[in-house]
Image (tube, rainbow, N blue to C red):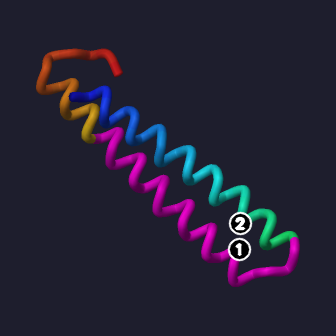
């Protein structure tokens, strides 16, 4: 069902934003290793969100729905 894929994408984007904020805080504090860890985690969550969004699009197409 596309709705679940959209929910998963939304969750991944929220997690990416949280890690981005943490990365920024760590870099600002001089903790570059922790900042890099959170930046990499943010990238991973964004990639997950893109995957979930793509899955939702495929499901919409399979259902003949143009709405997302």
Circle on res. 35: 1
Q: Nearer the viewer, residue 65 or 3?
A: 3
- Which residues are the magenta region? 29-54
Find residue 54 and report its image quarter. Answer: top left
Task: Tell me whether the residue at label 1 lies in contact with that at label 2, contact meaning CB atoms closer than 8 angstroms.
Answer: yes
Question: Does residue 17 appear left or right of residue 30 in this picture?
Answer: left
State how many labels appear.
2
Image disc number at residue 23: 2
Q: CA distance from mark 1 to mark 2?
A: 4 Å
Q: Give the dominant element type of the magenta stretch: helix, strand or loop.
A: helix
Label 2 residue SS:
helix
Looking at the image, which residue is at 56% across and 60% down?
A: 42
Q: Quadrant of residue 53?
A: top left
Q: Is residue 64 left or right of residue 50?
A: left
- Identified at 31% across, 26% down, the residue is 3
| Residue 35 placement (x, y as % from top left) | 71, 74
The structure residue drawn at horizontal position 63% and vertical position 69%, both measured from the top left corner, is 38
- Whichever of labels 1 and 2 marks the residue nearer the N terminus, that label is 2
Residue 61 is drawn in which quadrant?
top left
Image quadrant holding the N terminus, namely: top left
Give the residue at the far bottom of this rendering. 33
Q: Is residue 43 magenta?
A: yes
From the viewer's perspective, is residue 52 above or below residue 4? below
């Amino acid at each position: 069902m596309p709705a679940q894929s959209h929910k998963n994408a939304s969750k991944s984007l929220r997690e990416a934003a949280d890690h981005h904020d943490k990365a920024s805080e760590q870099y600002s504090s001089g903790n570059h290793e922790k900042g890099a860890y959170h930046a990499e985690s943010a990238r991973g969550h964004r990639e997950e969100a893109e995957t979930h969004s793509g899955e939702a699009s495929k499901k919409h197409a399979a259902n003949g729905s143009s709405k997302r």
